[in-house]
């Protein structure tokens, strides 16, 4: 069902208030790795509004490699995130980690993110298929494109067609950066499926200094949008600070991505 052979028309996902993701527009989703407190949300929202960015990312349930690392503010954090974003006309994308969280989160979310680690959590995908909220589905840590497409088919076949695919880098042997951002995936996925393709250069390369270049490359590769991490003080971020842009870097990147998209 997610194949271009089955449907030629590109899928466009309407988040309401004129915010649409899919072919024909370029979507920017930005925000911290983790939601930390009210002040942080307000500062990021202000930054996004100044730059006419309509979708804010931020995790409240965080999959962390170490159980002792910050694991997110949970549902109270999401409610605070939601209240501030709604007051400011910003849409929310945040990660859901398990089936039981869908129900408690659903009223406070515009797009559910399925993280790389849950990319083949088939129970979660089935349930998100029934949930009728847009989903951004990330490629698995070592996932093939075929596996990503089949994972999206779980959601789609349960009746939820509002799916975006996300290339976020795959694990390789190179130690000079965090992951290998596989931009080959973009044109290939665009040909194979009618679903929007989003690129996450932050997790894809994992080092702040290179995020902007890879984001721009993603635009030229044909991505329908980019999702990246930004924070008022990346060096103090609770998670992923090393790959997080400050607002000045973020602003410059937004401007350049829009210019690049115009050139495409
Ligand atoms: C994130 O977006 O902060 C995240 C944990 O992403 P991924 O699942 O791609 O590692
Ligand atoms: Mn992160």
Image: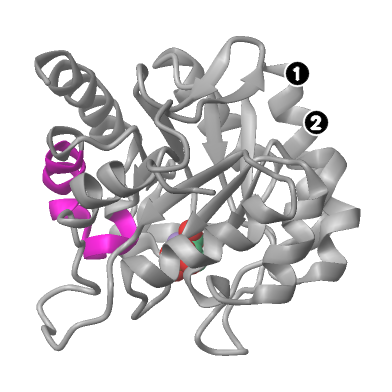
Label 1 neighbour load within 10 Å: few <14, some 14-19, many 20+? few
Instruction: Tell me residue 232's x, y (percent).
Output: 43, 41
Magenta stretch encompasses residue 191: no
* Residue at which label 2 appears: 83
* Residue at which label 1 appears: 87
Snapshot colouring: one colour
Determine whether the residue tagged by mark 1 lies in a helix, strand or loop. helix
Residue drawn at (27%, 52%) of the image: 201
Give left or right: position of 161 versus 186: right
Instruction: Tell me residue 59's x, y (percent).
Output: 61, 56
Residue drawn at (61%, 69%) of the image: 62
Farthest residue, direction top: 18
Region of the chain picked out in magenta, as a range: 202-218
Label 2 neighbour load within 10 Å: few <14, some 14-19, many 20+? few
Work out which quarter of the rendered image holds the C terminus and state it. top left
Q: Would you say the beta carbon of the disc 2 residue lies within 8 angstroms of ligand 1?
A: no
Q: Is residue 134 above or below residue 11?
A: below
Instruction: Tell me residue 170's x, y (percent).
Output: 28, 73
Q: Is residue 174 above or below residue 59?
A: below
Q: Is residue 81 above or below residue 203?
A: above
Can residue 36 be spotted in the picture?
A: no
Give left or right: position of 203 versus 55: left
Can residue 52 be spotted in the picture?
A: yes
């Amino acid at each position: 069902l997610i194949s271009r052979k089955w449907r030629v028309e590109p899928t466009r996902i309407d988040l309401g208030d004129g915010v649409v993701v899919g072919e024909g527009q370029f979507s920017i989703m930005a925000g911290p790795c983790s939601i930390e407190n009210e002040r942080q949300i307000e500062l990021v929202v202000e930054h996004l509004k100044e730059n006419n960015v309509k979708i804010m990312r931020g995790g409240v349930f965080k999959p962390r490699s170490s159980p002792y690392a910050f694991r997110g503010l949970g549902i109270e954090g999401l409610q605070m995130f939601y209240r501030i974003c709604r007051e400011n006309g910003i849409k929310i994308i945040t990660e859901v980690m398990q089936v039981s969280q869908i129900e408690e989160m659903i009223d406070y979310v515009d797009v559910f993110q399925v993280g790389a680690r849950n990319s083949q959590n088939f129970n979660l995908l089935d349930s998100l298929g029934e949930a009728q909220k847009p989903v951004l589905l990330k490629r698995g840590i070592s996932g093939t494109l075929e596996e990503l497409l089949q994972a999206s088919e779980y959601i789609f076949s349960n009746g939820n067609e509002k799916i975006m695919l996300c290339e976020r880098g795959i694990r390789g042997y190179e130690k000079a950066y965090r992951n290998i951002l596989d931009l080959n995936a973009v044109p290939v996925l665009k040909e194979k499926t009618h679903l929007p393709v989003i690129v996450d250069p932050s997790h894809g390369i994992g080092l702040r200094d290179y995020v902007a270049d890879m984001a721009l490359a993603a635009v030229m590769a044909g991505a329908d949008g980019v999702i990246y991490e930004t924070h008022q003080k990346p060096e103090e971020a609770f998670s992923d600070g090393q790959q997080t842009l400050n607002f000045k870097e973020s602003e410059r990147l937004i401007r350049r991505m829009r210019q690049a998209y115009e050139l495409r």
